[in-house]
Image (spheres, coloured by chain):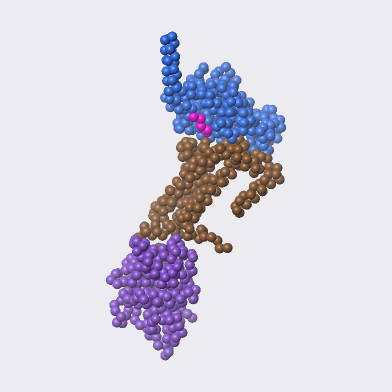
Amino acid sequence: MLRRLIQIVLLSVFVAAAHAQPLEKVTLRLDWVNSGYHAIWYLAIDRGLFKAEGIDLEVLEGRGSAVVAQTVGNASVMFGTSDTGAVMGLISQGLPIRIVGGYLRQSPFALIFPKKNNWTSYADLAKGNPRIGMSPGSGAAVLLPAVLKATNLEGKVQLVSMEPAAKPTALLEGKVDAIESFDFLQVPLLEANGMPSATLPFAKAGINVPGLSLITYNDMIKKNPALVRKMVGLMQKTIELGRKEPDAAIDSLLKRAPTLKREVVTQVLKLSFNLLETEATKGRPLGWMSPQVMSQSQDILIQYGQIKARQPVENYFTNEFVPGS
Amino acid sequence: MWSAGSFLLIFVAWDLAVRLFEIPPYLLPPPLVVLSAIAEHWGTLGVHTIWTTLTILAGFFAAAAVAIPLAMLIVVSPTLGRLIYPPMVATQAIPKIALAPLFSVWFGFGMMPKVAVAFLIAFFPIVIDTIVGLRNIEPGMIQLARSMGAPPRRVFLRLRLPNALPMIFGGLKVASALAVVGALTGEFVGSDKGLGYVLMQASGNLNTALLFATLVVLSVVAMVFFYAVELVERILIPWHVSQRAHPS
Amino acid sequence: MRREDAVQAVSATDLGGSGSAFIRVDGLCKTFAAQDGSVTMAVDSVDLHIGAAEFVSLLGPSGCGKSTLLSLIAGLIEPSGGSVDIGDVRVAAPYTNIGIVFQSDLLLDWRTVLGNVLVQFEMRGQDPRPHAARARALIASVGLAGFESKYPWELSGGMRQRVSLCRALIHDPPLLLMDEPFGALDALTREQLQVDLQRIWQSSRKTVVFVTHSIGEAVFLSDRVVVMTPRPGRIREVLRIDLPRPRAIDVRDTAAFAANVRHINHLFQDMGVIH
């Protein structure tokens, strides 16, 4: 009886102490403004995943992978999610950041076009001199030349420059025959506006630079590796939870961004899950990046001028914080 | 009365155009759809309007607080004027929209970069109009003041400055509109708060109804701000020809 | 000179027994350098003595330097040669114990009539409030009673010039300088203001130096008329106007008035100003 009592008291004290522990404030900046695929983070927060590990996570919206990477680089935010290609380019220019965990390890970039074009492979674009809408400087636009070269389409298509926001509209209005973008973003949007669409992923052309990854600045890795490990582990849990309960994730998202349209963002979220795994990551935990894929990505980026000097591929990423790897 | 009528006319023409030309909703939604979007998202729009308003006010007042004294300096000291004026004009040519993303990286995503952009855009018309206003005094007035024994400082404060007020207000009114543009630009490019951010989100999601709803709210904010400056003008310079009732 | 022309020239510097000169202009010259480097002589060796309480007109065609001469007397510009003395003071800076009225009324748009009159004290760094009552009286004396709170834009040109006159008088200066003050007004208002000015001058006994290009105005108002040559401005002749004071409006119909006007006209014809 007395032993039982002591156990209960000790447990209560322990629990109370754990709760009394001040939470570690952590900031994470997303690659863009709130969109369907970001829902997983909000669900994880609402379900207390981060709190359970002593982290008070603040999720901030971003304005493009390059900008987000730079704000991580100057330590104005602790973690960020950014496109791997953009990050590698910036690291090669000396930005003191590193990828600590892959998120969408399949390239999200694709050519998106109306289903009625009836294209099933890149070869189908060789006739008819199609117009491709692209926004210079975007992650996909940077890799587009590589895709065209790999698929023998150089000189056989017309590239039309436009603002990022104008791309879906241009496609809907028939001003262009295809656009480059994140496939999981555009397809639901176009469907919702009456245009069923299909995609030709860049990965299909062999240009498979990974997509969004979790990044942090080098000083953080040096000074607080425990936190980095926690965050990568939490990212794994966040992805799993979101994959299991997409509708609940959307609920959490809409609480923060009530102006978004439920059907569209749900689709976006679900499609994004297709990009979590690739051939190279089969059998590996979420977050693990393939050194071979990273090396190939560096090759592509060097070839197309995004990276000037070849570096050891470890400069770009590390798997040491990925639990289970 | 008349202004209400002209807005009504715009709405009617807008509605007709959408019907007549069968414009798809993702390009231009009909006015009623936009109005219902305002009603549907009034919470979001309301909160972000406050943020944008704060940015506009901060940028505007900062611009005025720096521009007016700087203009006075340039007028009072020709040597200093020759030093300051040319680089000031040169920097005006730099499109702030090119600087805004850099500001986000340097200053973060908070208020600073947006206020900085609003400040930079609103600054120039205030300086120029203040300089013109301060210089735009009849030489005879200066002669008169000198023969009254007024020292230069008194001539400046009691003559040049009040005389310059109408032109200064002209500059302030232009700047009020530009401060709105600047705040929007800053928000569009690097912020998670404000109507510019809502615009970005709406355009990215092809939510054109929300986009136009935001634009309508934004126009109202800009209008209110402009008329507020005009009200202050009416109070401070009731004597100026621009403030008198027009003879019928 | 014709026989009926009984008008005699007098000395520019000898005031004949009426006391020592209040204003002494000796050998005054003023040259201006133009942008292209050429030099214009505006005033050339002017000698002129003006007695206290005298009403003297500077009369001449446009560009003859009369306004320049006035500005030199006021100390608003520096002479290139010669000197100006007012009382015991050698004028080397703006002489402030004066009232000035220009052709343009130069009233402050943001002040009322009363405020504009009192600005004379404010510009001197003095508190205007003790003088408010006297200002009101002065405003009433020029026929503007009831307009103290009006703004300049609510007044006619003639009324505005009256306010300008009040501003020049409110601090009771011994010297009044006027540069074509009625030039911008219509003929009727002009005549009325000439009568008003004469009345004010007679009751206050100030020294007045009055610039004009109207022969009739100069003869009506002045004790002496200084006729100036076209540029470079020199004194051609100084006339004493012996018409009795106070001069009513219909003095203009008298033969003596006409004789003075005719004499001056002949001078201008002689100089080629009128041909």
Residue toward you, B217 or A270: B217
Q: Is residue A105 visible?
A: no
Percent across and percent down for residue C141 are 41, 72
Percent across and percent down for residue C148 are 43, 66
| Span highlighted in magenta in the image | A58-62
In the image, residue C146 sits, relative to residue A150, either above or below, namely: below
| Chain painted blue | A
Instruction: Determine the residue positioned at 56% across, 33% down.
Output: A257
Does the stretch in magenta take in A215? no
Where on the picture, by quarter, is residue B136?
bottom left
Instruction: Determine the residue positioned at 63% across, 49% down.
Output: B8
Residue toward you, A289 or A131: A289
Q: In the picture, which quadrant includes the N terminus of chain A? A: top left
| Chain painted brown | B
Does the stretch in magenta take in A61? yes
Name the dominant secondary structure of the magenta segment.
Answer: strand
| Chain painted purple | C
Instruction: Determine the residue positioned at 49% across, 65% down.
Output: C154
